[in-house]
Amino acid sequence: MRNIKLILSYDGSDFAGWQVQPGRRTVQETLEAAIYAVTQERIRCQVSGRTDAGVHALGQVVNFFTQTELPAERLVRAINAHLPADVVVRHAEDVPQAFDANHDARGKWYRYYIHVGEVRPVYLRRYVWHVTWRLDINRMQTASQPLLGRHDFRSFETEWPNRMSSVRNITYLEWRQKGPLIWLDIAADGFLYNMVRAIVGTIVNVGRGYWSEERVVEILHARDRRLAGPTAPPQGLFLMQVWYDEEPTLVSDEAFPIFLAD
């Protein structure tokens, strides 16, 4: 048996998330059906970062075991031939038997996009949260700084307790802007359910002048989800990268932004 690691990209707009759900279109079911068409094997993929309905991915990592003898580079072409237009395998490679995409992950990088303006962006509607408020990005960055480091993020977790521990370590958090687009890059050793979207909803309340910058610290220490801001919509969220060795360099002038908006 070979252990194959895949890197996926997909537009999550028309998926009910990653995980298989009866009667609903999911990324997992779609991918596993494509692999079956190539290998004739009923496999189950392990994944790092089970995205919710409407959430996108540029670098989601999965692994599965197979007896196929197709080389990894041919697997990419063969699997993609059976995938719909909104999901694609970017890379495949053989990895050690012990590799597990979920348990071996050391960190993840997410990005969240906001579009600010009176007129909604029709072509970006599936990939941004459109708001009409003026947002002060400097206040948003200042308010976000206390979230860096290891904390109990219970205030930013939906349906607590969702995991054994709500303690996570945020290693990078930066807001940027280009024209009407504002985006957050955030990296951590792991994320709680809806954690990024709850942080975005909270910081946007600061950026629009609804809350003070100091309130974010109070929310963090309170460990009470009811005190934080709303859960931002799913369509602005992208799983950018999962890493297994050293944390990558997240800041690159050439990488920002994914979208160009008028």
Image (spheres, rainbow, N blue to C red):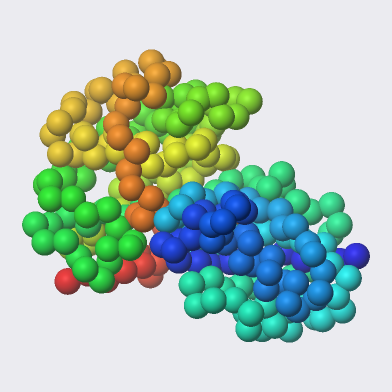
Residue 167 appears anywhere in the view: no
171 vs 239, nearest the viewer: 239
Quadrant where the image shows the N terminus: bottom right
171 vs 235, nearest the viewer: 235
Q: Is residue 5 above or below residue 149?
A: below
x and y percentages locating residue 128 in the rendered image:
30, 58
Quadrant of the rendered image containing residue 75: bottom right
x and y percentages locating residue 11 in the rendered image:
45, 66
- How many dots with numbers? 0
Q: Residue at x 15, y 39 (%)?
A: 208
Q: Is residue 205 above or below residue 177?
A: above
Quadrant where the image shows the C terminus: bottom left
Q: Is residue 78 above or below residue 11?
A: below
Q: Residue at x 21, y 68 (%)?
A: 122
Residue 1 appears anywhere in the view: yes
Name of the residue lying farthest toward the left: 118
113 vs 39, nearest the viewer: 39
Q: Residue at x 50, y 77 (%)?
A: 85
x and y percentages locating residue 224 in the rendered image:
40, 19
Q: Is residue 153 left or right of residue 101?
A: left
Name of the residue lying farthest toward the top: 222
Q: Residue at x 34, y 22 (%)?
A: 226
x and y percentages locating residue 215 in the rendered image:
26, 22
Q: Is residue 250 left or right of residue 211?
A: right
